[in-house]
Amino acid sequence: MKKGILVWTIAAVLCILYGICVLATNSGTGFFLIWIFLGVICLFLALASKLGLWKKLPKRIKRICWILMSLGMFVFLLTEGFILSGFSAKGQKNLDYVIVLGAQVYENGPSAVLKYRLDAAYEYLENNPDTICIVSGGQGYNEPFPEAEGMKNYLVKKGIASERILEESTSRNTIENISNSMQFLDAANDSVGIVSNNFHVFRAVGIAKKQGIVHAEGVAADTHWFYLPNNMFREFFGVVKDTLKGNMVW
């Protein structure tokens, strides 16, 4: 009993502290609240353990709870497994195009998440000089200019020729990143690499194939290890949402 209380209490503290750390990144989303919510749930479970509430539940209710938790865990682990499958994607050599998906930009340059993507794109473009790059991303309310503009500037400063970079500066999400970028390519015949952070590659490629890019594959960029749990957890909900809405294929 006492061990259960201690475990749930420690889990609650860790979840809440992690949520605060995610909030401090100024990512522009409210997903940090999920960690706060999980912390509150853990505190409730610690209290329930202290009061022995689980033992007081009828067996039928306990059985239903175990079934639901088992199903939920199965779906979660299965989905996370598919997400992990995109981590090693490097893209075959000499792709016709790579599409770099946008993310937050600031006056002084790309956000950390976007910088990882751009550095991965730069490395690929350096090794495959005939590949054309499409940078995709519009301007959010909290951004000084379109993401595509900032992305192109970053790559040009690193040495990629300006004429190799095409700008798509109207999209607001991954689906639009893909669909709006298709104006530059032949979706049925061109080979296309989707450049995004490793946790996002599986869904991004699934969306690209659903949009009609037949020869789509991933080019995975890194992610800061500390924020990977948050990204993986958030991506689970993204995959479930886009699957249920028919926006992607597995």
Image (spheres, rainbow, N blue to C red):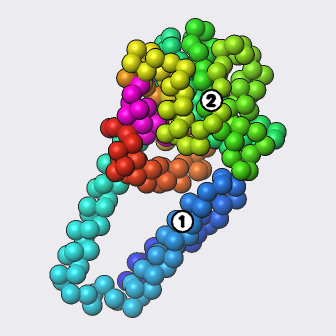
Residue 37 image point, x, y percent: 51, 71
Q: Residue at point 60% right, 20% down? A: 133
Front-most of 185 and 162?
185
Please, is residue 56 above or below residue 60 in the view? below
Q: Which mark is residue 124?
A: none
User: Is 145 on the left or on the right of 194, as rendered?
Assistant: right
Q: Amino acid at mark 1?
A: Trp
Cα distance in 3D space between marks 2 and 1: 34 Å
- Is 204 within the magenta? yes
Q: Which mark is residue 168?
A: 2
Please, is residue 55 above or below residue 17 in the view? below
Between discs 2 and 1, the one toward the N terminus: 1
Q: Residue at point 54% right, 31% down? A: 180
Please, is residue 154 above or below residue 246 in the view? above
Residue 157 image point, x, y percent: 78, 22
Q: Residues within 10 Å of mark 1 (few under 14, many from 20)?
A: many
Helix, strand or loop at disc 1? helix
Q: Amino acid at mark 2?
A: Glu
Residue 52 image point, x, y percent: 34, 89
The overriding secondary structure of the stretch rendered in magenta is helix
Q: Residue at point 57% right, 66% down? A: 33
Q: Residue at point 26% right, 68% down? A: 68
The quarter holding residue 106 reads top right
| Region rendered in magenta | 200-213
Q: Label 1: which residue?
A: 35
